[in-house]
Amino acid sequence: MSDVYIIGGGESKYGELWERSLREIAVEAGLKAVENAGVRTKDLSAIYMGNSLGGLISKQEHLSAIMSDHAGIATEYIPSIRVEASTASGAAAFRQAYLSIKSGEHEVVMVGGAEKMTELYGTEIIDITSSVVDREWEAFAGATPAALAALSARIYMKDFHVGKESLASISVNDHANAAMNENAHYRNKITLDQALNATPIAEPLNLMDCAPMTDGATSVILASEKYVKEHGVKGVKILSSAISQGPFALHSRKSFYTVEPTVISSRKALEQAGLKHKDISFVELHDSYSIYGLMTLEDLGFAEKGKANGMVESGIGIGSALPVNPSGGLKAKGFPYGAAGVSQIYESYLQLMGKAGKRQVKDATYGMTHNMAGSGTASVVHILGVE
Amino acid sequence: MGELSRMWREMPSRYRMQGKKCGNCNTVYFPPRDVCTTCHRDSIGKMKDMDMEGTGEILSFTIVHEAPPAFLRQKPYIIALIRLSEGPVITGQIVDIMPEEIDIGTKVRSVFRRISEDGKSGVIHYGYKFVPV
């Protein structure tokens, strides 16, 4: 089986891109990635696109075919598949692309992630984003993704005596890092005070605990070991890839603050890569809501359950022992649903290639990414590295 | 929402909390399931209808301020995880009480209420909500 490398990437600006369409930003990211990787679109043997809500928001399905067509290679007649796993669509698409090269089927593959979140009125998008949770038994009752995160937050805070400050620190860190990322949606730093006193969304969570509605697209190009050797290309190696799927609805789970799919996929990914937690130079994790930042640090195994607050208080910034979300994370780089997973991978690529500019993590050797579906229905963990 | 056939199909569960009980291991499921998550194929054909009493206790709750269109008239409203007396945990709304008057552990019972409506002239969806005992 072939080793698989990321040999380039590119992305659109993240933010409220009212003047641009879903296909425009998807294709922009794709073409930038092709250019950056030094390949030609005609070299691609397949395209995998992560997109979660295109059908409901932009009323356009099959974004992968749009990508192949508007990238100008429809008449190459290559396979082009959209992968959907709600908010984990991006990493799920990346994993399918990885497997397609690892298996020997493909040589050079494009992975894209794109979502246009700001196409609709405020309350309408809340109904549409509620399709990533159980429509019949959660959303029917009035539960939204934010409400489910809040249900986890309230019982977590009670059981472990954790204050709102610890949750808010996750968002403060994201904003501090995004200030150094020119593609980020929110480049303003926020204070703990601002984070604690924002308008309520689903108590105990407020606006600053919730990742924004962001338009954005990111692409990366993957290539086989053979291609990398023959062309003398430098890249980042994909050391492991794991995905795990658990009960759909929050109410069906054994725990409301342990996401088993994260525990299982991170354990598998570390095992496959032959690495330990201390080897990881930074982590890009799925903090669609601040509480998930704390829960995930624990479920990934960087802190004991209920104790991520200690780690967060001692610092998770760029110069810390484990920098969290150097990109600015979902809260501040932004949260285009189906693009988020690819965005995390691209940030890790930049970090590991030493191309992350002001937010560069020193001596970055191994990076972990964690992309989660909905309230914790599924998790995808990847470990990337440079030799 | 505008999902007439779905609402019609789900009436037994929405109107009288009809769930399922595994005839093999007696585990109760609400919402209903076609297969027991413990017995797997041994439960096929043995999942029996069973109505929930509608009593339970709050495991966690939130006050929702940003709501989808169908719930705008109700906001802010309380959403909770409720453990039913029969065992299953469900997601539901708590009504007829101020948020400061409930807590984790508060006992509740189900009531039949209007859940949401599909615009001014659309279908009205009914189902269970919960009030403190």
Image (tube, coloured by chain):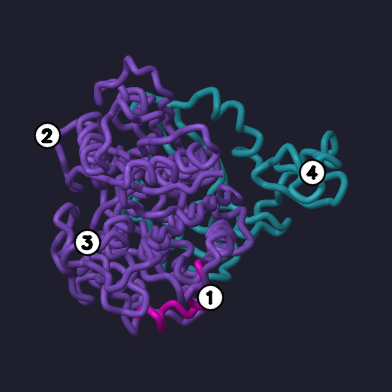
Q: Which residue is mark 2?
A: A19
Chain A colour? purple
Q: Which residue is mark 1?
A: A305
How far across and down, in percent of the image, does residue B132 sit? 55, 62
Label 1: how many residues lie within 10 Å, few (<14), some (14-19) or many (20+)?
some
- Could you confirm whether marks 2 and 3 are on the same chain? yes
For mark 2, name the chain. Answer: A
Quadrant occupied by the N terminus of chain A = top right
What's the residue type where badge 1 is placed?
A: Lys
Instruction: Tell me the quarter of the picture where residue A64 sits.
Output: top left
Quadrant occupied by the C terminus of chain A = bottom left
Chain B colour? cyan
Which portion, as a residue range, is magenta?
A: A300-312
- Could you confirm whether marks 2 and 1 are on the same chain? yes
- Considering the whole magenta stretch, tell me its main secondary structure: loop
For mark 3, name the chain. Answer: A
Assess whether residue A302 is covered by the magenta stretch: yes
Q: Which residue is mark 4?
A: B40
Question: How far, Cα to Cα, is label 2 from label 3?
Answer: 28 Å
How far across and down, in percent of the image, does residue B100 sit? 41, 70
Secondary structure of the residue carrying numbered label 2: loop
Name the residue located 55 percent from the left edge and 27 percent from the top edge. B6
